[in-house]
Image (cartoon, rainbow, N blue to C red):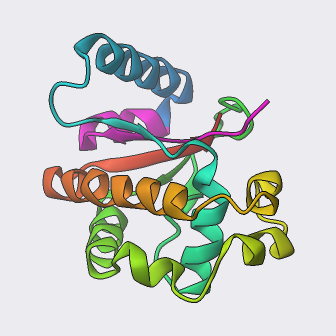
Amino acid sequence: MSMIGEYARLTPDEFARALRDPEWAEERVDELVEAELGSGGDGEPRCLDVDKAWEALDFLLTRAGFPVDVVFGDDAIPGAEEWGYTAPRFLAPERVREAAEALLAMPAERLVAGFGPRDLAREGVYPVIAWEREESLEYVTAHYEALVPFFAAAARDGDAVLMWLD
């Protein structure tokens, strides 16, 4: 089984309700995912997954001194159970804005500069087998580049972002 990094944008009202009612939050995120699957990708996404690149993103962003934890968030949704491998965590709207600005300021090339697949394998970054096979870091940068507009749209709209491993 694979661990997939998942994200969902919630409006301020949805976010406030999610903090009070974690079961509702899970249902709402499921609705958002289903709606996007049914739309064929039309419109701006409210959900995003970074596949198995989540730990490489976390490692590289931490290494770069990134100011916001865009992989694991700041806090857990109070009372939430696991949504797969982890309980959902979040970034509140003000932290989403900070993350969006920092993402826009860091090109993907800078994120991976001076680092390669062997380095990730040596550090034990998931999925280690991919890095041992020396798969390209383009996989990681492609998912990083998807985070940039996702967070930019969330910041523009004043949304919070939930994240979890599924």
Magenta stretch bounds: 1-19
Q: Which residue corresponds to the image point at 38% horizontal and 15% vertical from the top-left?
A: 31
Using the rendered image of the protein, determine whether residue 154 is visible from the camera's viewpoint.
yes
Q: Which residue corresponds to the image point at 84% horizontal and 67% vertical from the top-left?
A: 124
The front one of 67 and 41 is: 41
- Residue 8 located within the stretch drawn in magenta: yes
Q: Is residue 80 left or right of residue 146?
A: right
The percent coordinates of residue 104 (x first, y second) are 26, 73
Q: Quadrant of residue 72?
A: bottom right
The image quadrant where one finds the N terminus is: top right
Q: Which residue corresponds to the image point at 35% horizontal and 16% vertical from the top-left?
A: 37
Q: Is residue 48 left or right of residue 87?
A: left
How many numbered marks appear? Answer: 0
Q: Is residue 41 above or below residue 142?
A: above
The front one of 143 and 10 is: 143
Q: Is residue 17 above or below residue 91?
A: above
The percent coordinates of residue 36 (x first, y second) are 31, 21
Q: Which residue corresponds to the image point at 15% horizontal and 50% vertical from the top-left?
A: 157
The percent coordinates of residue 16 (x first, y second) are 36, 40
Q: Is residue 24 above or below residue 124?
A: above
Using the rendered image of the protein, determine whether residue 88 is visible from the camera's viewpoint.
no
The front one of 19 and 1 is: 1
Residue closest to the far top: 38
- Residue 106 located within the stretch drawn in magenta: no
The image quadrant where one finds the C terminus is: top right
Q: Is residue 129 left or right of residue 45?
A: right
